[in-house]
Image: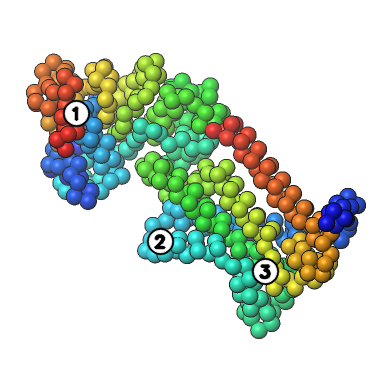
Amino acid sequence: MTQTLLDALSLLGSFDHRLLDIVALSLRVSLTALVIGALLGLPLGAWLAVANFRGRGALIVALNALMGLPSVVVGVLVYLALSRSGPFGSYGLLFSPAAMIVAQSVLVVPLIAAVTRQIVEDAWRDYAPELSLIGIGRAQAVALLLADCRFSLSVAMLAGLGRAMSEVGAVMIVGGNIDGYTRVMTTAIALETSKGDLALSIALGIVLMALILGLNIAVHFIRGWALRRYG
Amino acid sequence: MFPLRIDALRFAPEGRVVLDELDLVLPGEGISVILGPNGAGKTVLLRLLAGLLPVHGGTIVWGDAAQPAGRLAMVFQQPMLLRMSVFANVEFALRPQAMNSAERRARTSEVLERVGLAYRARDSARLLSGGERQRLALARAWAMRPRLLLLDEPTASLDPSATEAVERIIREIRTEGAKVLMTTHNLGQATRLADDIIFLAEGRVQEHEPAQRFFAHPQSPAARAFMQGELPWRIAFDR
């Protein structure tokens, strides 16, 4: 056990290129999925917070339920959509990083949208009377509330990033875990552990944990600074 | 838009009567102060006039129209301040109006100057003190050039100097031609500001008199009891 841990630290210390490639691909895939998730999830959640239409409650329940969507189910659905016989088969995306980005985005969008909806709705409840008297419409209110809740919404972004980076089932199915092409940290950990190469698994696990912890610490301090600066 | 005529106004959410058979006629000038015990429906009346709550019965007629022709602004007890600068908190409220950017900026600078917040224009609005927040909310309402300004306890929880500053701004807004309708629990403030007093209790107007006459000789038993500090508890238990 101790030897395995020393081997893992040695891999980290030597900046093993195989390990760095996997980390770089993981970050590229997950951060791209996060950007897509934010671009779609933030406005969707904010719109749902201020909108008033028949079936809104059902949509909110569905969105909340989608937060717990099993990643393997998403993997299968995206696999079917991108396979040769699927509606997007002609794009040839299956078993590529692009397919993994699509799968992670499908997982992240409902999560960001659901958390955003809750945060923005709380603010909307306080702001709606004054905004409506001023003459601000619901569409303008969406942009205004997203800007006003930006520090609280960092939680939604962190949750989305955590979901994307820790996900293994969907990217395994649609990416294929191809060495040097679609192998990311989580799929590599699963594979190397099953092969008995625990040193690489532990090294990747340390990097994964450090990244998530580091990002959370950074956001915590940035949020604290911003609250002191802007109230 | 004026006179504002309210006839047999009723507000009873889920059967709980808050206002009932409320009649009131308001002229288009001066400061009208609504007094009354807690739960009398003062804030509800302001919100009904602002269109923020649905009317359950009766009519509100603005001059000859069902909707107010002039602009209406409201300052709440806890004003909404966006996480933006003091300047931006006023300027954004002018965007729905037919003004270009230069006009909006000029108007914003003007009102901030008049409420004494120009020196804090770049600061975050959320970092202002209670008195400054209320002055900013008044500046935002003032910038919109309202014909009717509704104020819901604008100085609640402010210290005397902040209260004095807010009262000075309210007088200036009145002088510029806006009709002011406000609620307060502060009888001293009502004495200083009011041209007329609307005394509300048990969901209706008990008395509407010029301020001097009201304070010298309150006519209704409820108003007399309120002035002697007895009414709030009695009403609270009766209801």
Question: Residue at label 1?
Answer: B233
Between B159 and B234, the one nearer to me in the picture: B234
Q: Secondary structure at mark 3?
A: helix
Between B39 and B104, the one nearer to me in the picture: B39
Question: Residue at label 3?
Answer: A169
**Front disc: 2 or 1:** 1
Q: Is residue B118 above or below residue B54?
A: above
Q: CA distance from mark 2 to mark 1?
A: 41 Å
Around disc 1, counting alpha carbons within 10 Å, would you say few (fewer than 14), some (14 to 19), or many (20 or more)?
few
Check the residue under mark 3 and report the chain it is in.
Answer: A
Q: Are marks 2 and 1 on the same chain?
A: no
In the rendering, at what x and y percent does residue A135 appear?
Answer: 39, 44
Can you tell which quarter of the image residue A98 is in? Answer: bottom right
* The N terminus of chain B lies in quadrant: top left
Question: Which sits earlier in the primary sequence, circle 2 or circle 3?
Answer: 2
Q: Amino acid at mark 2?
A: Gly
